[in-house]
Image (cartoon, rainbow, N blue to C red):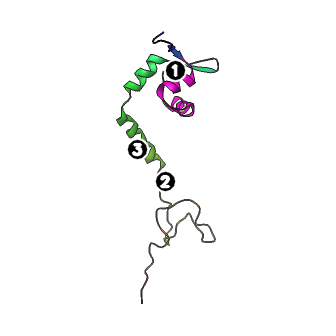
Amino acid sequence: MSGSNDPDILNIEQAAALLGVSVKTFNKVLHSQDLPARKIGREWKFSRSHLIDWVGAGRSSEFYKDSQADNADMVSPQPPTSSNGTSQAESPAGRRSSEPSEERRTSGWRLSLD
């Protein structure tokens, strides 16, 4: 045992409490990161010292690089346009699809103010 009543092996609730996050958040991190853990039967088990080392080994710059790469993947390309300049994303009735587009429908309009 490491401290007074602190166990060395933690279940998911204890591990989440150690890191100061909800079990739901901890579970998301467990599935998206490379946490030091072992699944025994149906339960995840965590070493207190390895979790502390894992947090200490992380770098915020790695998080921001990953976030920027994720955001780059989320940007959708512009829909191709046909020879007459209309978007191919338009339906046969001339209505636009529900997909967002960076080009506004009024981008070519000129208004004359009297």
Q: Quadrant of the C terminus?
A: bottom left
Give the secondary structure at mark 3. helix
Q: Which stretch is magenta?
A: 10-36
Q: Is residue 59 shown to the viewer in this render?
A: yes
**Could you give the CA–CA distance between mark 2 and mark 3, rounded to whole angstroms?**
15 Å
Residue holding disc 2? 76
- For badge 1, the amino acid type reads Ala
Residue 36 against residue 66 in the figure, above or below? above
Q: Which mark is residue 104?
A: none
The residue that disc 3 covers is: 68
Q: Secondary structure at mark 2?
A: loop
Residue receiving disc 1: 37
Q: CA distance from mark 1 to mark 3?
A: 27 Å
Please name which of the two marks, 1 or 2, marks the residue nearer to the observer: 1
Where is residue 3 shown, x and y percent of the image? 45, 12
Q: Is residue 34 visible?
A: no
Q: Of residues 85 and 73, which is closer to you in this image? A: 73
Residue at left 59%, top 63%? Answer: 97
